[in-house]
Amino acid sequence: MAINILIPTPLRQFTGGKSEVAVNATSVDEALNELTGEFTGLRKHLYTEQDTLRNFINLYVGDEDVRYLDGPKTKLSDGDELTIVPSIAGGSAAAPAEELPALTTEEYQRYSRHLILPEVGLDGQRKLKNARVLTIGTGGLGSPLGLYLAAAGVGTLGVVDFDVVDRSNLQRQIIHGTKDIGRSKIASATDRLKDVNPNINVEAFETRLTSENALELFREYDVVVDGTDNFQTRYLVNDAAVLTGKPNVYGSIFRFEGQASVFWSGRGACYRCLYPEPPPPGLVPSCAEGGVLGVLPGIVGTIQASEVLKVILGAEGILLNRLLLFDAWTMRFRELKLRKNPHCELCGENATIKELVDYDAFCGLNLPVEEELPYEEISAKELDGWIKGQVDLQIIDVREPHEYDFANIPGAQLIPLGQIVNRICEIPKGRTTIVHCKGGVRSAKAIGYLQDAGFQGRLINLKGGITAWSNDVDPTVPKY
């Protein structure tokens, strides 16, 4: 039977860039075996060493999660679509109408287009004014999210961030401007939100969200919105939202693809129901490594803002128990069903997670200090000294061709990460090989792939990648 497997962006590097792969199969496991038989490098990202499907990989036939069908044994029909969905890097009861704050004359004019909507009206606008929403992050997702919530008249916006504005942020983080470069994002965002709507109250928290402060913060708000860009904070937001009973309006982005949902354990699934555990560190590149289309977080963040307003208003049709997938490149929306996992360790019938944990450790980011890296590293300055000292070495650049075209280290040979094993014969074993990418993540993976493939030569990772080279050796090399 002809089955079409949809490949998500993070895994396309292992399928030669293909977004769809056609196979002949009668069941899900047979389809995956056909897929990984053709693209062998993909298998270890889908399966554990015990040959079981990884917990951060979900599979859908049509819009149905196979975990609630027959799992990998789920039968397929001719023409079925099998979607691989990996993990990628809500309100409280409204107050009675008489307790809601009144609108000023200026607010009647400002919100007039809301007031004439029967679905919002006067009582709805007063609910928005009464609401307290906490947004985590003022970046790509937090920018449109915050701007639209402020414009809509959400009375109190809590904003959590600890970063500063960088020039590379401005391609997508529209709450900040060129004049804000080098300024704290909290200060920049607060000024912009108050300029959009001086009637709202902005509560700024210039701090990192941690296991120590999350519960106290969340208890003071009606809705929490996840605008984060890393797995450890995403699980922290989810867990704190469940433990405090708050709806969690979720969004995530990568390159051209986005996801959105509303996780609300009191009424449905939480994030752990969808992804019980995070992917291994480095599997899913950050936006800095993988890139992101600038308008994508604007679209996903605006969807999140819409869901926040609907939760506050008590509207039907929120993204509860539904996962919305969006591909900006093909302009395609898809929707998948979510179900509350009765065995979820956090929100299930016999939950075992009762408090927040160390999320860096949970996501595999806390390596023991005594544990050595499985490869050598070299700094940009050390490499420059080796080159000037005419040390016999070769430099392999594992970025993509379009990256190499506008920023490269002289003499480096381009072999993209997805081709590194197939082109192993192009790397002489008798010379010291320096491997680099943008920041050091992809090059470390490349070294691992080469070692797994049996390469016997000396491999050294350039710490900090070409960014470090630009910072410490040659500032004429463009940074991106």
Image (tube, helix red, strand yellow):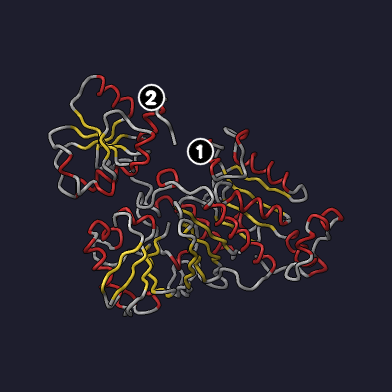
* Rendering quarter of residue 341: bottom left
- The relative height of residue 215 versus residue 476 in the rendered view (above or below) is below
Q: Amino acid at mark 2?
A: Asp
| Residue 441 appears in the figure | yes
The kind of secondary structure element at disc 2 is loop
* Labels 1 and 2 touching (C-beta < 8 A): no
Report the quarter where the N terminus lies: bottom left
Point 27% across, 32% down: residue: 412
The kind of secondary structure element at disc 1 is helix
Percent of width and height locating residue 53: 31, 66
Q: Give the number of callouts.
A: 2
Point 29% across, 74% down: residue: 2
Q: Which mark is residue 346?
A: none
Point 64% across, 43% down: residue: 189
Residue at the disc numbered 1: 168
Mark 2: give few (<14), some (14-19) or many (20+) Cα within 10 Å: some
Percent of width and height locating residue 449: 23, 48
- The relative height of residue 188 versus residue 361 in the rendered view (above or below) is above
Percent of width and height locating residue 125: 76, 63
Q: Which mark is residue 474?
A: 2
- The relative height of residue 218 versus residue 346 in the rendered view (above or below) is above
Mark 1: give few (<14), some (14-19) or many (20+) Cα within 10 Å: few
Q: Nearer the viewer, residue 197 or 265?
A: 197
* CA–CA distance in space, label 1 to label 2: 19 Å
| Residue 358 appears in the figure | no
Q: Amino acid at mark 1?
A: Ser
In-image side of 173 versus 232 (left or right): right
Point 48% across, 54% down: residue: 253
In-image side of 364 versus 419 (left or right): right
Label 1 vs 2, first from the N-terminus: 1
Q: Nearer the viewer, residue 166 or 220?
A: 166
* Rendering quarter of residue 178: top right
